[in-house]
Image: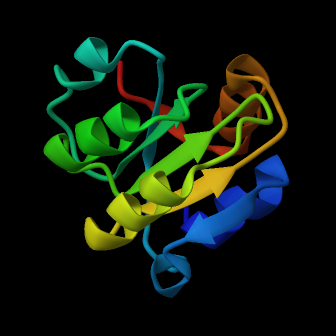
Amino acid sequence: MKINEIVNIIGGKVICGEAMLDTEVNKGFASDLMSDVLTLDTDDVMLITGLANLQAIRTAEMSDISCVVIARKKKVSNEMKKLAEDCNIVLIECCGSVFKTAGKLYQAGIKPVF
């Protein structure tokens, strides 16, 4: 599924990475524990989290995650946006909970990592 489709499904707002909205993402992982994200060994995965901090972006970079959804109406800081831009990561804000957001994407065809 293309990232622009994901944005529409969750009613998200793209904060940065507009040039990569045609990128395919096939799997999703929802977590606020960045240590769990670091254990992932898969491609084409997106991260759904309620953590609106630099650690979430750095973890995505180290895990080769190209798309991060910040849920629960959390707002992305300027520092997060700048780091995501530097790392070529699409950053999306959405109003839904992590659970609801992941559920919508699962229902639309995004596969779980495990």
Give the image location of residue 65, x and y in percent.
Answer: 30, 49
In the rendered view, does 59 fall on the left or right side of 30? left
Give the image location of residue 107, x and y in percent.
Answer: 73, 34
> How many numbered circles are shown?
0
Residue 82: image quadrant is bottom left
In the rendered view, does 109 fall on the left or right side of 55? right
Residue 56: image quadrant is top left
| Image quarter of the N terminus | bottom right
Note whether 70 is above or below 34 in the view shown.
Answer: below
In the rendered view, does 9 fall on the left or right side of 19? right
From the viewer's side, name the closer residue of 58 and 23: 58
From the viewer's side, name the closer residue of 90 and 105: 90
From the viewer's side, name the closer residue of 5 and 61: 61
Q: Which residue is drawn at 54% across and 71% down?
A: 16
| Image quarter of the C terminus | top left
Q: Hey, which residue is sitting farthest bottom in the picture?
A: 19
From the viewer's side, name the closer residue of 83 and 63: 83
In the rendered view, does 42 fall on the left or right side of 7? left
Q: Which residue is drawn at 36% across and 27% down?
A: 113
* Color style of the picture: rainbow
Note whether 11 is above or below 101 in the view shown.
Answer: below
Give the image location of residue 42, x and y in percent.
Answer: 20, 39
Q: Residue at x 15, y 43 (%)?
A: 62
Q: Hey, which residue is sitting farthest front in the picture?
A: 78
